[in-house]
Image (cartoon, rainbow, N blue to C red):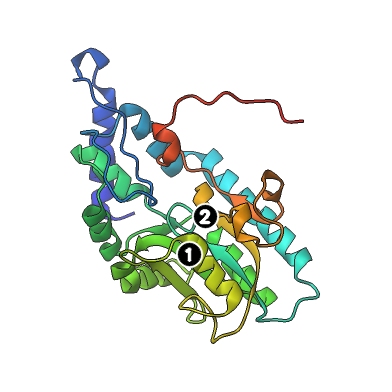
Amino acid sequence: MHSKSGLISSFLIALLAVSANAQQAVAPGPTLTRQQTVAPASPAPSPANNLAIKYMRDSEEYATLVRQVYRGAGSVITDKTRSLAKGSWAVSLDIDETALDNSAYQLELAAYGQEHSTPAFNAWVARRESRAIPGAAEFVNLIRQLGGNIAWISDRDSSTAEATRQNLAAAGLWSDDDRLCLRETGGKPKSARRQEVVSGRGKCSWSGSKHRLIAFVGDQLGDFPSSEEQIPETGSDSAFGSTCFLLPNPTYGRWTNAVTRIFEQEH
């Protein structure tokens, strides 16, 4: 980590140590979902969200879990691609909290009582300081060794493209043969960008060559195809663990604004 991270971590520890009776009530933590364009109205992150950040940064369990997901994905893809021609298939990867760890950005928000916003996040991206998620570098290297391509399909702002490439490269994740498919203002959703890979037409394609999307890795359900996209072996719960691989993200997502869900027994 950078030298200022130690100071920020010390500040956050002191913040969490303050008695609950001495704290002013705060609204729930910010929803940092990339699928939303409006920042949440909460004035500051909650102590519960601070613990979620700490879990990502400091727990051995989180690091082990994400490595486990990546190893499982690599094993499945190795088996699936034994008979496929090199360069004929690809893997779709999200970026934030899937390949790059932005917990230092979230830590700064918490330390200074700030909200997530697109300008704040773009400024963070420009710093190129995100580290690789454990297991991500080994996974992308395996995909390339097997003869596959990588489409980075992210809702980062397209204005951050060069900084994003440089950060991915610094983290050992980028290859010049990759495709970086970011969100343009008023542009295509992730589903449309996935179709560009499959059809061989558009910015996310490889020189007009159709690619079979073998697997998808992400931290939000929007990173995975819906049934309407008609991509083979996707669009249902059974796809997870075989074609779709979900990493945990305890810090943000649509779930932060959802009511408690009643779990129904599956038959």
Q: Amino acid at mark 1?
A: Ile
Depicted 223 relative to depicted 258: above or below: below
The residue depicted at 30 percent of the width and 51 percent of the height is 37
Residue assigned mark 2:
223
Q: Residue 148: x and y, percent?
A: 64, 75
Secondary structure of the residue carrying tag 1 is strand
Q: Earlier in the sequence, mark 1 or mark 2?
A: 1
Q: Is residue 231 left or right of residue 111?
A: right
Q: Residues within 10 Å of mark 1 (few under 14, many from 20)?
A: many
Q: Is residue 123 left or right of residue 215?
A: left
Q: Quadrant of residue 229?
A: bottom right
Q: Is residue 42 left or right of residue 236?
A: left
Depicted 33 relative to depicted 261: above or below: below
The residue depicted at 51 percent of the width and 61 percent of the height is 191
Residues at discs 1 and 2 in contact (Cβ within 8 Å): yes
Q: Nearer the viewer, residue 108 or 189?
A: 189
The residue depicted at 53 percent of the width and 80 percent of the height is 201
Q: Residue 233: x and y, percent?
A: 71, 57
Count of residue discs: 2
Q: Nearer the viewer, residue 54 or 212?
A: 212
Q: Is residue 134 visible?
A: no
Q: Residues within 10 Å of mark 2 (few under 14, many from 20)?
A: many
Depicted 98 relative to depicted 21: above or below: below
Residue assigned mark 1:
153
